[in-house]
Amino acid sequence: MNKSGPIIIIEDDLDDQELLSEVFHKLHYKNEIVFFGDGEAALTYLTGTKTEPFIIFSDINMPKLNGMELRAKIHENEELRIKSIPYLFFSTAAEQGNVVDAYSKSVQGFFIKPSSFDDLYDIVKTIVEYWQKCVSPDYVR
């Protein structure tokens, strides 16, 4: 896991993108924040770059390639899987079927998007600080 790598946010709602951008700005992390509006664009980036992201925050319902489909493609791609990039879902609702499906694809967390800035700030801070302290396997290419 590249703890200094970019934080990837896959979110098609521009208001949510702006809110997350404000949260990360206030948190002052040194990681670059990279937004994608759909899973297809994110997959193109992830498979086409040598940059190793630190963490991925993903919405579920998106155009072209939804979050579940994207997670499955990442999990099936050996080159991406061995990078041990934490993949978390941020969704407006937690339907039990989606939660079960997410964890069956080895997602590392499923969170409901809070409605207040302060709650969003707290949850993002908690998540990022957890993964900053987490140990992951080293891999050799």
Image (tube, rainbow, N blue to C red):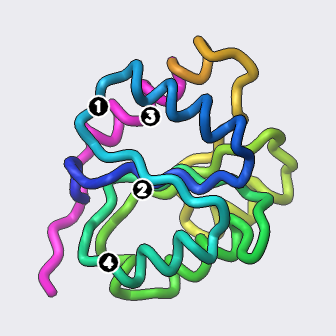
Magenta: main secondary structure equals helix
Residue 27 in the image: state x and y as whole percent: 37, 22
Are discs 1 and 2 less than 8 Å apart at CB? no
Q: Amino acid at mark 4?
A: Thr
- Is residue 67 one of those drawn in magenta? no
Separation of residues labelled 3 and 4 (CA atoms): 25 Å
| Residue found at the very far top of the displayed protein | 118
**Magenta segment, which residues?**
122-141
On residue 95, which mark appears?
none
Residue at 32% over, 77% down: 49
Q: CA distance from mark 1 to mark 2?
A: 17 Å
Residue occupied by mark 4 = 49
The answer to whether 70 is drawn above or below residue 30 in the figure is below
CA–CA distance in space, label 4 to label 2: 17 Å
**Left or right: 7 with respect to 114?**
left
Residue 100 percent across, percent down from the top left: 75, 59
